[in-house]
Each structure stands twice: as structure tokens, then as C-alpha cells.
């Protein structure tokens, strides 16, 4: 075993089962191992490196900020956080933003907003948050409680109380839960990512929106994985003409630096007041400078390229040998193959392509700006591997 693997296995907590690949560096959609072997990256570090590895414009923005001030704490004013919040609000019509450092933290904030709004408006007993079975919302004890998958809950009970789970795409079940319980908010992913790249039905998304509006329930859209251009719109909810009260996001937002954001609409923008919430690292200037360089480049041209690349992947893989189905939206794609997903990923890595898995599927989350020639090459290799007997 290599020295790196030995050191990692000896000293890093056993929480990750890693693929057999040691990444040394990368540029754009190409990654390199320590022997210099080249790989086409189809995973972006789980949808994080939106413009690939060490993108020039992103790097310049980060380096510039790094040389000015790397941290101030939220006790003082400094520009990058304010500018990023303004940009996010301009792009979404939301009113205010709270910054944390991860997707889980963005969701924690969203849950706090829903609970405080409901407590003030309807009473403290309106604390329940409804989420979907098979969802994923994070690893903190509260976002684990929000995550509707038992396998993540084992060994960590009791979790934060006040979460109710409903089947995706089942409108009557949701209506019953709401009439039987005192509900503060509903939190959904437009495409369940960790759950296996399952898009919700459009009719269900609209029904959830309507139910929230009719009952004054806070609609939280978890755009941690689907957001920031990933699904072909700035945020995936924008495909459906709905109006969320709260949007949480992270992953692709910082282009590779840790940042999470909770976007609040006018209705809830002043629910949190002084002292209600905080994060020492929140709105870190370097992370925010990186995020501004990413977010400001997610324009109509880029989004239409995302859609074009998505259509190409679907047209190549749907009905191909060894592939049972293809799901997803934009450049967030799940492939159900006849062979186990991990086996396919391992074979792809041998052949110089890095896909990911999501449950029993092979998952693709390439950089939004992956060049077409690299995308084509990677898709052909994935196709070959799926077809091999
Ligand atoms: C990854 C993910 C999270 C958790 O994000 P972290 O940054 O790992 O805390 C939450 N929700 C969704 C939909 C995710 O994909």
C-alpha cells in the first residue's frame, strides 16, 4: 500500500470508504494522480468545483482576497459577504442571506427560520418540519433528523425531535400529515441527490408550493446539490415557477471553498434578529470572493450549455447496452446500470474517468464548463464500461 494510503488509514477517522485514486492536482475538468496519469473528472468533488479545478478567474479572485484580508469575524463590515449576498438576492428575488460554511449549516438556519416564524405567527407548538423519505439534508443531529433515511440515523438517537417524513410525489399523504400535525415548514430537494438522483414530479413540486401558501407553512428548498447552475437554471426550483420562502445552498456555491448560504424571502427576511444565529467563519471573505467569481458567471449562456450537455448525456446513455435507466436534471445525472455502480466507477477510474455513485446509481456531476470534447470522451468510456459483460 502507498505511503499516502497508509497514513490516511492510520490517522484519518474511518468515516469514508475511498475509491482507489490519489489525486495530486487538477486543471479544469482534468485531474492527475501522483504518477501523472490523467483523468476526466465527472464528479467535481461532489458537485463543488463548479468551474473545475483551479479555474483561472476563481483562483485570481481568491488570491486577491487572500492578500487583502482572510478573516474579520462578523463583528465588522467587510465587502465580499455583502457583495455576494446582494448578488444572490438579485439573481433570485430573495431579500436576505445568512452565510455558514456547509450545506448542513445552511439547512440548520433554514429550519430555525421556519420554526421561529411559525412560533411567532401560530404558536410554539407549530414546530414540525416535514421532509421526504429518501431525502438527504446533512449530518448534524438536526439535519440528520431531517434526512428521511433510517440508515443514517442508526447509532445516533435521540435525534432532534419535530421531523415528519412523507413519501415523495404523494400529495394526499402530505395533506394528511399537515392536517394531523402542527407544521412549521416543508423541506424538499427538487432532485434527491444522495437518495439516487431522483427528480420530483413537477405536479408534486407545484402542489407542495400551493399547500405551503394555503396553510402559511414555510417552503424550504434544499438546493445544496441542485443549485448554482447545476440543474440548468440558477436554482432548480426556477424550472417550476414556484416561490420558496427559504432556499439553502452550498456545494457548488464556493467553487471549492467551504461556504453555505440560507436565502430568505421577504416574508421571513426579518425573522432572525440580533443574537438568534451566528457562525464565526460565516461569510469568510476568501470563500465569498471565490463564490462571487462563480455566481457572477452563471448566466444564460452557461445555463444553456448545461442544458445542451445534459441532453447529449441523456441521448447517449438512455437505452444503451447495460443501462436500465437515466435520471436527473441538467448536469446532475444518475445512471442505473445492470452492473453494480461501485464496480462501474472502479472500472471507469482505471480507464481515466472519474464518476461518482449515489445509492445504487452511477452519478455524474461534471464541472458546468466541462469542454464538449472531454465530456464526449468520458461519456463514451462510461458507455463502454456499462456495456462490458
Ligand atoms: C451535500 C448535501 C447536504 C449537506 O451538505 P454538507 O456541506 O456536507 O453539510 C445537504 N443537502 C443536500 C441536498 C446535499 O446534497
Image (spheres, helix red, strand yellow):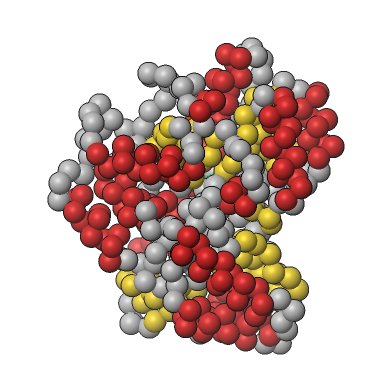
Q: Residue at x 39, y 67 (%)?
A: 52
Q: Residue at x 44, y 76 (%)?
A: 371
Q: Can residue 156 be spotted in the picture?
A: no
Q: Is residue 107 above or below residue 330?
A: above
Please state if 156 lies on the left or on the right of 58 as rendered. Answer: right
Q: Is residue 194 above or below residue 213?
A: below
**Location of residue 127 in the rendering, given as x and y in whole percent from the top left corner:** 64, 21
Q: Can residue 53 be spotted in the picture?
A: yes
Q: Nearer the viewer, residue 282 or 385?
A: 282
Please state if 19 lies on the left or on the right of 191 as rendered. Answer: left
**Location of residue 262 in the rendering, given as x and y in whole percent from the top left corner:** 47, 37
**Location of residue 348 in the rendering, given as x and y in whole percent from the top left corner:** 54, 79
Q: Quadrant of the C terminus?
A: bottom right
Please state if 67 lies on the left or on the right of 154 as rendered. Answer: left
Please state if 356 lies on the left or on the right of 65 as rendered. Answer: right
Q: Is residue 182 above or below residue 255?
A: above
Q: Nearer the viewer, residue 243 or 99?
A: 243
**Location of residue 195 in the rendering, given as x and y in whole percent from the top left corner:** 65, 54
Q: Residue at x 37, y 39 (%)?
A: 85
Q: Answer with the quarter of the image where residue 313 lies.
A: bottom right
Q: Answer with the quarter of the image where residue 347 lies.
A: bottom right
Q: Quadrant of the N terminus?
A: bottom left
Q: Is residue 85 above or below residue 162?
A: below
Judged from this view, the residue extending furthest toward the left is: 67
Amino acid at each position: 500500500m502507498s505511503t499516502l494510503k497508509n497514513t490516511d488509514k492510520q490517522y484519518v477517522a474511518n468515516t469514508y470508504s475511498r475509491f482507489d485514486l490519489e489525486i495530486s492536482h487538477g486543471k479544469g475538468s482534468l485531474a492527475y494522480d501522483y504518477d501523472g496519469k490523467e483523468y476526466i473528472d465527472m464528479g467535481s468533488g461532489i458537485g463543488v468545483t463548479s468551474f473545475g479545478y483551479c479555474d483561472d478567474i476563481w483562483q485570481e479572485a481568491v488570491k486577491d482576497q487572500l492578500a487583502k484580508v482572510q478573516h474579520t469575524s462578523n463583528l465588522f463590515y467587510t465587502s465580499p459577504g455583502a457583495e455576494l449576498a446582494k448578488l444572490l438576492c438579485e439573481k433570485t428575488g430573495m431579500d436576505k442571506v445568512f452565510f455558514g460554511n456547509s450545506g448542513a449549516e445552511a439547512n440548520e438556519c433554514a429550519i430555525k427560520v421556519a420554526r421561529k416564524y411559525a412560533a411567532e405567527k401560530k404558536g410554539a407548538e407549530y414546530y414540525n418540519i416535514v421532509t421526504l423519505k429518501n431525502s438527504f439534508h446533512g449530518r448534524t443531529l438536526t439535519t440528520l433528523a431531517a434526512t428521511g433515511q433510517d440508515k443514517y440515523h442508526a447509532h445516533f438517537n435521540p435525534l432532534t425531535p419535530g421531523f415528519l417524513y412523507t413519501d415523495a410525489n404523494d400529495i394526499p399523504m402530505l395533506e394528511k400529515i399537515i392536517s394531523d400535525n402542527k407544521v412549521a415548514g416543508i423541506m424538499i430537494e427538487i432532485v434527491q441527490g444522495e437518495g439516487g438522483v431522483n427528480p420530483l414530479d413537477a405536479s408534486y413540486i407545484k402542489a407542495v408550493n400551493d399547500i405551503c401558501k394555503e396553510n402559511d407553512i414555510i417552503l424550504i428548498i434544499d438546493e445544496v446539490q441542485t443549485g448554482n447552475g447545476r440543474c440548468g437554471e440558477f436554482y432548480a426550483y426556477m424550472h417550476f415557477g414556484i416561490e420558496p420562502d427559504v432556499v439553502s445552498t452550498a456545494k457548488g456555491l464556493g467553487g471549492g471553498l467551504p461556504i453555505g448560504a440560507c436565502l430568505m424571502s421577504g416574508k421571513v427576511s426579518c425573522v432572525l434578529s440580533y443574537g438568534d444565529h451566528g457562525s464565526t467563519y460565516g461569510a469568510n471573505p476568501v470563500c465569498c470572493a471565490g463564490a462571487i467569481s462563480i455566481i457572477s458567471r452563471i448566466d444564460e449562456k452557461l445555463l444553456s450549455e448545461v442544458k445542451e450537455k445534459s441532453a447529449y448525456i441523456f441521448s447517449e446513455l438512455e437505452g444503451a447496452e447495460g443501462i436500465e435507466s437515466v435520471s436527473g436534471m441538467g448536469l446532475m445525472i444518475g445512471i442505473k446500470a445492470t452492473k453494480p455502480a461501485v464496480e462501474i466507477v472502479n472500472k471507469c477510474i482505471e480507464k481515466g474517468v472519474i464518476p461518482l455513485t449515489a445509492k445504487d446509481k452511477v452519478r455524474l456531476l461534471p464541472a458546468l464548463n466541462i469542454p464538449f470534447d472531454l465530456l464526449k470522451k468520458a461519456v463514451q468510456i462510461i458507455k463502454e464500461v456499462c456495456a462490458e459483460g
